[in-house]
Image (spheres, rainbow, N blue to C red):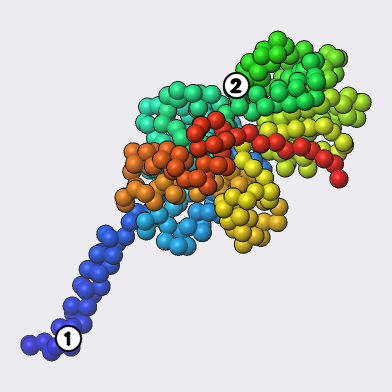
Amino acid sequence: MKLSHIQIYFNFLPWLFAFVSCFCSASKPPEIKLGMSIALSGPAKQIGEQLHLGSQTYFDKLNKKGGVNGSKINLIVADDGYEPKRAVNNTHRFIQDENVLALFGAMGTPTSHAVSPILEKLRIPYLMPFSGADFLHLNPTINVFNIRASYYDEAKVQIEYLVEEKKHTKIGFLIQADEFGYVVETGLLKSLSKYNLKPIKVARYLRNTHDVDRALKTLKSSGVTAICLVGTYSPLSKFINTAFEEDFKPDYTSISFASSPDLFSSLKYPTDLMVTEVVPNPAQCDNTWCKEFLSDMRDKNIDRPTRLHFEGYLNAVIFSLAATSCESPLEAKCLMSQLDETFRKNKEIHELFTYSEQTDKHKVYRSLFSLK
């Protein structure tokens, strides 16, 4: 039987749709997968939540505009509770099951230390980790890209503040007992030695606990007049509040990892506390990215954006600027090269993190606690 033109058309139509669909799928750039292992539970969860929200805010905006050279960015987030074993499990899943291009914005020194053997073997890019540990900054053995100041940079500013400005010589340390604590303690000791000083007493407590009572007793009886704090906001705030209630009122400094907004909001009493920071207060900054960040936070109905939000946001900005300079599909080699290029040559980015275009010396900012 002879088919009519209409019958031929309808018989051909499904094949036409299939061809067009196949063509569109083949020409659509693949998404860019990034794996982010952070604390979304436990006593450090607010750090992870803020870092994630900052990064996701920028990526969401970018994806609405078409992504990076047509590729959407898929930020795959997993909770490690700030525990190394869970970070290792997350990293294996990101690489084996999700086939991520890179690990992005990972949180913590002990977690970074734990996943390093995997990264050394596979050379997966480790981008903008939330850690200032020396093994991530000085001659790293992994394929890492950093933008934040090191913990040594922060330690130097803290000791200068306590010795030169506050005139302390009897300084003690409260240290989280793990790789994070060890790295920061090393920087503090090195900075103290320049003034021919040593800590009067070093007290320690376990990660992800509030078990600081013994450390408080030790430091209180030692005669220290100032304490360098190394840990997260929850146990540190307990230490400071309990010390005040026991009429022990030393001056304090703390590392940026503690999360100054969460630490400050947990303090009940007047306290002399200075926290070193790796990004400026975006509300007091004229940089283009500060202004864009605040605008994007308002769009997300975030009334009180923090430095942690801002650091996560800037991580996403720098990744995206670098990735845009590479051809699609994005490859790790081009990405790492362009990250260095972007950080060195983008004036607006560079001035947020370094003191001038002629040096790689990272800026360290300050936050001072005031009880209103």
Quadrant where the N terminus is found in the figure: bottom left
Quadrant where the C terminus is found in the figure: top right
> Left of 256 or right of it: where is 314?
left
Residue 302 picture location, percent across and down = 67, 56
The amino acid type found where label 2 is placed reads: Val
Residue 220 picture location, percent across and down = 85, 18
Question: To which quarter of the image does residue 332 belong?
Answer: top left
| Residue at screen point 55% across, 42% down | 351
Residue 79 sits above or below residue 204 on the image: below
Choose between 70 and 40: the one closer to the eye.
70
Crowd rating for badge 2 (residues with CA inside 10 Å; few <14, some 14–19, many 20+): some
Choose between 49 and 165: the one closer to the eye.
165
**SS at circle 1:** helix
Q: Which residue is mark 2?
A: 183
Of callouts 2 and 1, the N-terminal one:
1
| Residue at screen point 37% across, 38% down | 337
Say the numbered circle drawn on residue 7: 1
| Residue at screen point 65% across, 18% down | 191
In this rendering, does residue 43 appear at all?
no
The amino acid type found where label 1 is placed reads: Gln
Residue 87 picture location, percent across and down = 52, 34
In this rendering, does residue 264 appear at all?
yes
> Left of 26 or right of it: where is 337?
right
Label 2 and label 1: CA atoms lie apart by 76 Å
Say the numbered circle drawn on residue 177: none
